[in-house]
Image: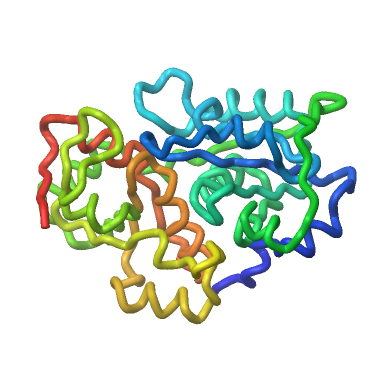
Amino acid sequence: MSAQIDTYLIEADELAAKLGQPNLVIFDASMHLPGANRDAIKEYQEKHIPGAMFFSIKELSDPNSTLSHTMPSAAFFQDQMQKMGVNNDDQIVVYDTQGLFSAARAWWMLSQMGASNVRILNGGFPYWEKQGHPTESVQPMPNANGNFTAAFDAQKLVPFEELLDLVNKGDQSCNILDARGPGRFKGETDEPREGMRAGHMPGAQNLHYAAFLDDEGRLRPKAELEQIINEKFDASKPTITTCGSGVTACVILLVLEILGHQNTRLYDGSWSEWGARPETPIVKG
């Protein structure tokens, strides 16, 4: 059964009315692709939503992994959230400075680690500013450690070996959805990370995350999301999502969850792993 969209999204006016509530946690989860010439932390330090802390997707990823962004252990994530003062019963709002790009990754990480009340600011920081809501440069510090307790179900991730076997066998029993842009998917443009071959996995389908967004970076109405999904692939099948480094693939996961699709998993290594390993099959076009 699909969920109400406001279970996952919060509008700027509603968040503005909640500012200052004691159980409200706001995270700026901005990040940018290599080569974008943007510094997410510097931008956060210059201005952010009042009370927002910086959720570094890089720093909160597995510190022992050689890949860009992979899920850490529950113990590591729990420790980091507690140091940021996060509690189990907090209302958590995440946003980014592109509208909806990396905020979905923060939502997915927090939700999979056990946070039960996480919403994404619809339209992100650009829409917040457009609506005339306040910003600040003061970086808040938690008054005390929180009591956040993390638990993670590794079954929500697809191991590299399983996906490689599935692709090599040409198994069509599940969807593989690639959230990268069409140029990268087709191998017509270079990857933003060095050492990556261009193209896509055999059998994968391209579903650019931006297809779900309107011109203001806001998630499209639920009926439009459903139409995009139904036109693109057989949503009754299990679905694996992938992208460049496991970030925008979470936009697809967000949409699928809103629409009630439960049999979904993330290939966390994504193209950062697949495009760098010599044994992986890659096609172009």
Q: Is residue 129 found left or right of 259 in the rendered image?
A: right
Residue 56 sits above or below residue 103 on the image: above
Q: Position of residue 153 (x, y in %)?
A: 50, 41
In percent of the image, x 44 and y 44: which residue is there?
A: 247
Q: Quadrant of the N terminus?
A: bottom right
Q: Residue at x 43, y 33 (%)?
A: 69
Count up the numbered dots.
Answer: 0
Measured as percent of width and height from the top left, residue 30 is found at 56, 41
Residue 193, position as x, y percentages in the image? 29, 33
Point 60% across, 70% down: residue:
3
Tell me which colouring the rendered structure shows: rainbow
Does 247 sit above or below residue 224? above
Q: Quadrant of residue 280?
A: top left
Judge whether 132 appears above or below 193 on screen.
below
Q: Nearer the viewer, residue 199 or 238?
A: 199
Q: Quadrant of the C terminus?
A: bottom left
Residue drawn where x is 10% and y is 42% of the image? 281
Residue sitting nearer the eye, 199 or 176: 199
- Which residue, as the protein is rendered here, is positioned at the far top? 64
Classify residue 124 by image quadrant: bottom right
Is 285 on the left or on the right of 275, as rendered?
A: left
Q: Is residue 227 left or right of residue 89?
A: left
Which of the pair 278/43 is nearer the observer?
Answer: 43
